Image (tube, rainbow, N blue to C red):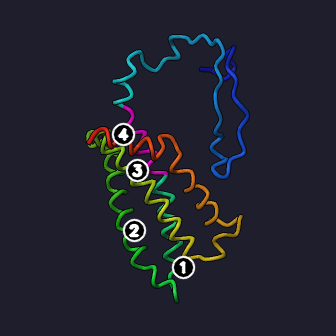
Amino acid sequence: MPGDTPGLRIAPQPSLLALQATGSSSAILDDVRIGVDWCLTADFTPFIARVRPTFLLLQSSFCWGLARRALTEARAALHGVNEVLRPDLDELEAMAARLARQIRCGVQDRRALPATRDAVQIRLAAARLATAAVALEAKALGGRGYVSDSATARRVREAAFLPIQSPTEGQLRWELSRSA
């Protein structure tokens, strides 16, 4: 719907810990009349079933990108005593490679789009990978990674949002438990 629709208000953007550039806010609808030409579909359930795997893969790609950058930075910091972290890095890089293949396959070829359950698993795995990769980067960089305006600190804050990004980790895990 157009932003100047009568009855539509956009709540002020909250001051977030990270991801401020997302412009996250809420739409408040008060007696809004919605034109039929504004509706994406009149058959919601099949529509969501059709588009949800793509949305989940797109969210997964954000998580993967965050993880990939964190792993690159961690690798650059693996010298001296930090060599002890190499097995962790190798494991996370292997996981990132597997997820990249799954995401790329589904995004590049609609015929290879995973079933919703598989897309949910990919999304959950990608968020967990990003969280683990950013934690590894912070360990490898040490104190300089915790300087508030460092790129590492920004990634730490971004990764902190992933468990509550909609769909939340709880919602993803709940959905997987119900479809087992």
Residue at numbered disc 1: 77
Q: Earlier in the sequence, mark 4 or mark 3?
A: 3
Which stretch is magenta?
51-62
Q: Do the residues bearing badges 3 and 2 touch, measured as CB atoms within 8 Å?
A: no
Examine the image and state in which quarter residue 158 appears. Answer: bottom right
Task: Name the residue rendered at 70%, 23% in the picture.
Answer: 9
Considering only order in the chain, which callout, 4 or 1, is on the residue closer to the N terminus?
1
Q: How many marks?
A: 4
Q: Position of residue 93 (x, y in %)?
A: 39, 68
Circle 2: residue type: Glu
The residue mark sitting in front, 3 or 1, is 3
Q: Which residue is mark 2?
A: 93
What residue would you read off at disc 4? 175
The secondary element bearing badge 3 is classed as helix
In this view, the residue in front, 175 or 17, is: 175
Find residue 39 and report its horizontal and vertical position in percent.
49, 17
Q: At label 1, which amino acid type do we have?
A: Ala
